[in-house]
Every structure is written in C-alpha cells, then in structure tokens.
Image (cartoon, helix red, strand yellow):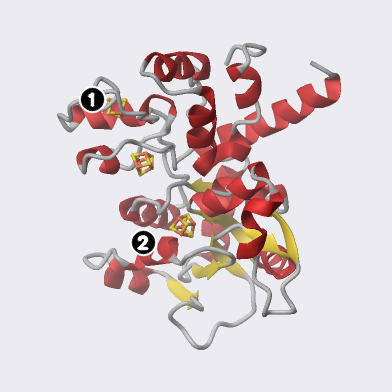
Amino acid sequence: MTSKRAKKVKEASSKAQAVASFSQDAKAAMASAKMDTAPAKPKVGFYGITGCAGCLLSFIFNEDEILDLVNAVDLKAFPFIKEVNPDEQFDFIFLEGLVADAEDLEVAKKLRANAKVLVALGACACTGCVPAYRQFSLKENYEHLLYRKEAHLQDVKPTPVDEHIKVDFYIPGCPPDKQQIINFIKQALLGKAPPAYTSPVCVECRRNGNACLLDQGKPCLGPITVGGCHAVCINGGMECWGCRGPTTDMNLGLMIKILREKGFDDKFIQDRMRTFVGLKLPMLERVIHGEHNT
Ligand code: SF4
Ligand code: SF4
Ligand code: SF4
C-alpha cells in the first residue's frame, strides 16, 4: 500500500471510529458549554441541510418527554418548525443532512462557527448515508435525477459533514433512535458526554429473542454494525443494512466470508455494505479482493 493511500485509510478509519465512539476532545467542549452557560438554559438549535427531515422528526417524536425538555433548554432555532430563527451563538447545534451542494457547505460552516458543540445528527450527517452512494455510481445512472430547475444549486460531491467541519459528537442512524437524542440532551444538561454505544446490533437482537436472519440465509449486517437502535429492523423481520455505521473492531473479512457462504456474490456484498456507510469503509474493495485483512 502506498504511504498516501495508507494515510487516507488511516484518516477514514479514525473518522469511522469517531462515528461509533464520539470524538474525545468533544468531552471538553461539552463541559465548557455547560460551564459557560450555567445557570442560564443552554441555547440549542436544530438545523438541516440536504436530508429528508427524518432525523429532525425523530427528535420531535419524543412526544412524552419533549415538553419537559424544551422547558429545560432554550430551543432558539428549529427552522423546520419555527418561523423566527436567530443567527447567533449556540451552546449546542444538532445538524441533520450531508453536504451535497455549495449552499450546504456554506450553511455547515456558518453553523460550526455559531456552535460551542456541534452534533452530527443521523446517518446523512455522520456517514453520507444513501445520498453519498452516488460516489460509487456511474454518472449516467444518476444524472437524470439531479435538480435542474434551481439554478442556484451548485452540485458538490455528496459527503458527511466531518469532511468539511469539525464535529464534536455523532448520533448515528437513519433515522437516529429518538431516545438517544433525548439521552444526549439530558447528559448535556448535566455537562456530561453521552456514553458511546460500541456493541454490534447482534447484542440487542439476541437480547430481544429474534431468530437470526443470517441463519435463514438473509444478508444481515448486524455483526459489523454499531447497535443502539434496539435492533429495530430485525424485530420487524428485516435485515440490518448497517445504517449506524461500522463497529470499531468489526471483522469485515469474516462478514464477507459468511455472506459468500450464504450465496451472495461480491457485487451484491459491496453494494449492500456501501448503501449507508460506503465512505466509512474505504478498505472494502481491498478486503473483498483479499488484499487487506479487516
Ligand atoms: S439520515 Fe435518514 S432520516 Fe436522517 S436525513 Fe438522512 S435519509 Fe433522512
Ligand atoms: S439477525 Fe442480524 S443482528 Fe440479529 S443476530 Fe442475526 S446477524 Fe445479528
Ligand atoms: S438494525 Fe441496522 S439498519 Fe436497522 S436501524 Fe439498526 S443499525 Fe440501522
């Protein structure tokens, strides 16, 4: 492997780890955001760039707890539901979506400058999610889908936000687990960093008593995917597609071997693994071709 390529893989691998485990220096930012604002309520903003608003809705769907929560923080900005959204300094900004055009980039940089703590909310922000799959596709396959009418839209390579701005914390998932967002805010109110969930989806899946879909010949990515979603897809009979990102200690080679034994070809395996987190698996092609161990 060339030293340039090795450096790229190392960088991408450390970002993948950050998605799963939160960045270390963010803990200091969290403590500072709490310290500087006490006893005033922390100022919070929820914003979206290119995405489907599902992550923002995930927060709103906490109907049992949201009223208590919005009393405990100063929910200053939430353009999805509020008309007046001041442009000022925030203690916490939750950002949904990925960078897919020049305006996204501008907004992301502005929000970063306005935030003591910036949280990437959901798979689009954390990994690029499905929209970033375009990076693995031929232009003729998606060109007809690009917006033509809005002249101001300048297309850029679809990328997770940490390719452009510093991210303090990651709340993964498409959409993220609604309770995880609430728990994050509760911990933030105490000035604490939220605990990172590092076990694979299989742990929650088995705890829930599900029959294993891999055993039934279905291409479940639970063994290499960070849990914390209560194995919601498997509970509903669908296999895990890996939306919460790879675990830090995944055995990618073994996962590929198992899927091959179940009859899936390399093209299928590569496409499935790239759907949600392709940009966080820069080693995938080399592992498939036996040139890399993990
Ligand atoms: S992560 Fe999923 S739910 Fe959230 S904006 Fe992207 S596509 Fe929508
Ligand atoms: S169904 Fe998927 S997540 Fe559940 S135990 Fe099997 S491989 Fe793991
Ligand atoms: S089971 Fe897999 S695909 Fe489904 S929400 Fe959890 S991590 Fe995402």
Residue under the image location 51 percent in, 58 percent down: 34
Q: Is 226 above or below relative to 290?
A: below
- Mark seen at residue 212: 1
Q: Where is the C terminus found, in terms of image quarters?
A: top right
Q: Is the residue marked 1 within 8 Å of ligand 2, measured from its CB?
A: yes
Residue 167 or residue 217, whichever sits in front: 217
Report the residue that reaches farthest toward the left.
Answer: 209
Q: Which residue is mark 2?
A: 58
Across and down, in percent, residue 36 comes to 58, 62
Quarter holding residue 18 = top right
Residue shown at 53% from the left, 23% from the top: 266
Left or right relative to 277: residue 41: left
Type of amino acid under label 1 = Cys
- Of the 4 image quadrants, the one containing the N terminus is top right
What amino acid does circle 2 point to? Answer: Ser
- Residue 24 seen from this side: no
Left-right relation of 37 to 227:
right
Dot 2 or dot 1: first in sequence order is: 2
Q: Is mark 2 within 8 Å of ligand 1?
A: yes
Label 2: how many Cα within 10 Å (few below 14, some 14–19, many 20+): some
Q: Position of residue 140 (x, y in %)?
A: 68, 53
Crowdedness of circle 1 by 10 Å Cα count: few (<14), some, many (20+)?
Answer: some
**In the depicted structure, whether residue 93 falls above or below residue 75:** above
| Viewer-side label of 2, 1 | 1
Depth check, front residue: 217 or 28: 217
